[in-house]
Image: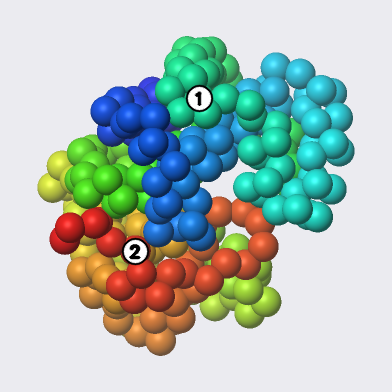
Amino acid sequence: MDQAADFFEECQVLDHALEGLGAVDWGTVTQFKAWTIDDVLVHLHFWNQMADLSQRDPDAFGARVQQVMPRIQAEGFRATENAVIPERGHDLRLAWRDLYTRMAYDWALLDPKARVKWVGPDMSVRSSMTARQMETWAHGQEVFDILGLTRPETDRIRNIVVLGVNTFGWTYTVHGRPVPPVAPHLRLIAPSGALWEFGAPGPDLIEGLAIDFARVVTQTRNVADTGLSVQGSVTQEWMAIAQCFAGAPETPPPPGARHRVGH
């Protein structure tokens, strides 16, 4: 399953960005909801644990969901996750690395079509691994931004782009809007320079870099801060509310709110 290798590479790229941090640096506040770098890694490690448990021990996963979801609803994600994950700083980085390394190896051997439980509907092993890569990439963005670093991208980002395309209808549903009958046509340039096309040609068209599209659907950038060409009323509406992740409806960052520090 290629997605397991892509997940591992995504984690490795973020891990490399963290290797020079000192003890104080882990408390640096990012541009995402005032989360610190510690908060970001706690979040990724917590949900990696949940995903891995869903595959290894579905009953234990169900019990964990019953335990943590009421607390998340009452206190929020950050407070709950920080209470469950004790490690911080370099120790947290090591625990996170140990788990993602084992997960990448173990999950590569699984049937991609096998079903695993989740907080919402069950999903395939492939979808679960793609979600973990997407979360790592999306939340990794605030780390790269606050450290003033440019993340090296490869065509592994295609998994996130496909997720963004496949959640077109979900975006409208979660925001309480009727789903348009036809999704926009996409013409995106991959990091390798390849052309990726999705959907049938029509009046609604998105053109530009695949990285920019992924940033919009993961809400790490406002569409106005990208180089995407957005044509058509449906396309403009979608890019204003795009959300490829589960949960409650979220509002994209305002223009200029998310950027690489120093640029």
Instruction: Give the answer, above or below, for where 100 lies relative to 119.
Output: above
**Residue 259, quarter of the rendered image:** bottom left
Q: Is residue 195 visible?
A: yes
Left or right: 184 as drawn, with respect to 117: left
Q: What secondary structure is found at the residue carrying circle 2?
A: loop
Residue drawn 55% across the image and 54% down it? 245
Marks 2 and 1, the one that precedes in the sequence: 1
- Name the disc covering residue 258, or none: 2
Instruction: Give the answer, above or below, for where 79 lies relative to 14.
Output: below
Q: x, y percentage for residue 229? A: 24, 74
- Given this view, does label 2 or label 1 mark the residue nearer the observer? 1
Q: Amino acid at mark 2?
A: Arg
In front: 22, or 66?
22
Residue drawn 39% across the image and 30% down it? 23
Q: Residue furthest front?
A: 24
- Name the disc covering residue 71, or none: none
Residue drawn 86% across the image and 38% down it? 66
In front: 37, or 189?
37
Give the colour scheme shown: rainbow
**Residue 87, quarter of the rendered image:** top right
Q: Amino acid at mark 1?
A: Leu
Q: Which residue is mark 1?
A: 92
Q: Is residue 198 visible?
A: no
Q: x, y percentage for residue 16? A: 28, 27
Residue drawn 64% across the image and 38% down it? 82
Q: x, y percentage for residue 211? A: 27, 53
Q: Gap in Å between the C-alphas at discs 2 and 1? A: 25 Å
Q: What secondary structure is found at the residue carrying circle 1?
A: helix
Left or right: 169 as drawn, with respect to 70: left
Instruction: Give the answer, above or below, for where 195 lies relative to 236.
Output: above
Q: Residue furthest left?
A: 193
